[in-house]
Image (tube, grey):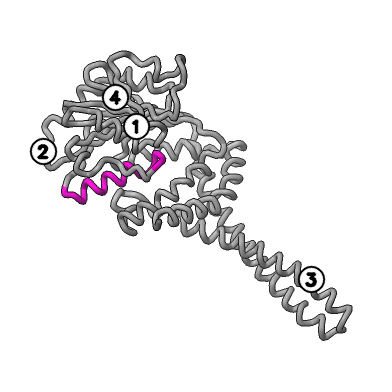
């Protein structure tokens, strides 16, 4: 009745995921590495009951498509390779699915993100914790196989593990199906993705451009998401560019005024001097705007966190970098989406 599909890039946590699933139902692991990892690789050490198919590094959407197309059961449950299904998960997922009416196309597990005790969660931990309230995430999401066939599966233009699940859910619900939450529980542990993780996450802005292109401006509300911060990032980036350009123009004007003074006396100097003063004032206003927007963004990220020196430094540094990086990725995504 049910096949479990787990795409992987060879994380060691895959073994814990499969152990929690148990041996009571078919499991397909989709190896999405571009090349096998050798005899010591995690995928190479999987038990014989697990079927392995390959998707050749084409991303999680393509990997899940390869997995469900290899399945032969009416239901396919997608799990990530770093989650831990709760005790009794196999029986719980069966109970979630067995009596669903025909118009229900999918069932989402309840995602639990354990946060550290004794302190406030850091920025990366809060990012992962957002999965606990997200809709239709494939950390634990079951779909009827015929619905996947009629929808064409996941859109492989979403090359990262971001928005491809939301896109499929929107297409399925707009086709007249319902999606529901089940009672099974799956834990998504928090992992440390490094100092620059929040900057790397900005690549998702390119996928947001594709979502807008496919589903219109109301797509965020349709998946229960917030308004996003791209407009403020654009304003921050514009203020930084304006301050830089006006300051450079004022510096160039100083050189011009000096040369004009040697040639033409007081009248030649007064015009450029006034011009230069206005440019410095405008550059100062733009710089203040950039500083205020950056400080607000940094504090918004620092305030709910542990406020340790290391976390404060990371939030300040990455808050300087994120706005222009987010805008660059969004422009890249808009260009690709229009093509």
Between disc 4 and disc 2, whose residue precedes? 4
State which quarter of the image contains the N terminus: top left
Q: Residue at x 43, y 53 (%)?
A: 336
Local SS, label 3: helix
Query: Real-space Cα distance between discs 3 and 1?
Result: 61 Å
Foreground disc of the pair 4, 2: 4
* Residue at image mark 3: 254
Q: Residue at x 56, y 62 (%)?
A: 238
Foreground disc of the pair 2, 1: 2
The image shows residue 249, relative to residue 197, as above or below, that is: below
Q: Residue at x 57, y 54 (%)?
A: 294
Name the mark on residue 28.
Answer: 4
> Which residues are drawn in magenta?
159-176
Query: Real-space Cα distance between discs 4 and 3?
Result: 69 Å
Foreground disc of the pair 1, 4: 4
Location of residue 162 in the rendering, given as x and y in whole percent from the top left corner: 39, 42
Foreground disc of the pair 4, 3: 4
Between disc 3 and disc 2, whose residue precedes? 2
Local SS, label 1: strand
The image shows residue 235, relative to residue 226, as above or below, that is: below
Location of residue 6 in the rendering, given as x and y in whole percent from the top left corner: 32, 28
Location of residue 316 in the rendering, given as x and y in whole percent from the top left corner: 60, 46
Location of residue 171 in the rendering, given as x and y in whole percent from the top left corner: 24, 48
Name the mark on residue 101.
Answer: 2
Query: Real-space Cα distance between discs 4 and 2?
Result: 26 Å
Q: Answer few, some or many: residues within 10 Å of disc 4's Cα (few below 14, many 20 plus, some between 14 and 19).
A: many
Q: Is residue 98 left or right of residue 23?
A: left
* Residue at image mark 1: 112
Whether residue 311 is visible: yes
């Amino acid at each position: 009745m049910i096949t479990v599909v787990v795409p992987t890039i060879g994380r060691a946590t895959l073994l814990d995921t499969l152990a929690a699933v148990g041996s009571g139902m078919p499991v397909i692991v989709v190896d999405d590495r571009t090349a096998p990892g050798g005899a010591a690789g995690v995928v190479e050490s999987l038990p014989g009951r697990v079927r392995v198919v390959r998707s050749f590094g084409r991303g999680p959407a393509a990997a899940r498509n390869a997995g469900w197309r290899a399945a032969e059961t009416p239901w396919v449950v997608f799990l990530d390779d770093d989650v831990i299904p709760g005790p009794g998960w196999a029986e719980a997922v069966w109970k979630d699915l067995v009596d669903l009416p025909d118009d229900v196309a999918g069932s989402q597990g309840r995602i639990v993100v354990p946060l550290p005790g004794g302190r406030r969660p850091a920025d990366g931990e809060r990012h992962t914790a957002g999965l606990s309230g997200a809709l239709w995430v494939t950390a634990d999401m079951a779909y009827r196989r015929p619905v996947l066939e009629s929808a064409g599966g996941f859109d492989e233009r979403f090359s990262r593990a971001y928005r491809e699940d939301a896109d499929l859910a929107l297409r399925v619900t707009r086709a007249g199906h319902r999606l529901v939450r089940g009672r099974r529980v799956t834990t998504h542990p928090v992992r440390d993705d490094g100092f620059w993780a929040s900057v790397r996450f900005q690549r998702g802005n390119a996928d947001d451009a594709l979502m807008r292109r496919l589903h219109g401006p109301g797509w965020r509300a349709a998946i229960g998401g917030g308004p996003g911060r791209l407009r403020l990032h654009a304003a921050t980036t514009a203020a930084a560019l304006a301050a830089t350009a006006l300051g450079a123009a004022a510096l160039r004007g100083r050189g011009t005024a000096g040369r004009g003074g040697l040639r033409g006396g007081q009248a030649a100097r007064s015009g450029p001097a006034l011009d230069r003063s206005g440019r410095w004032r405008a550059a100062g206003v733009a710089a203040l705007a950039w500083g205020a927007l950056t400080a607000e963004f940094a504090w918004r990220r620092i305030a709910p966190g542990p406020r340790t020196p290391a976390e404060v430094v990371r939030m300040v540094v990455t808050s300087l970098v994120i706005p222009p990086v987010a805008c660059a990725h969004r422009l890249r995504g808009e260009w690709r989406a229009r093509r």
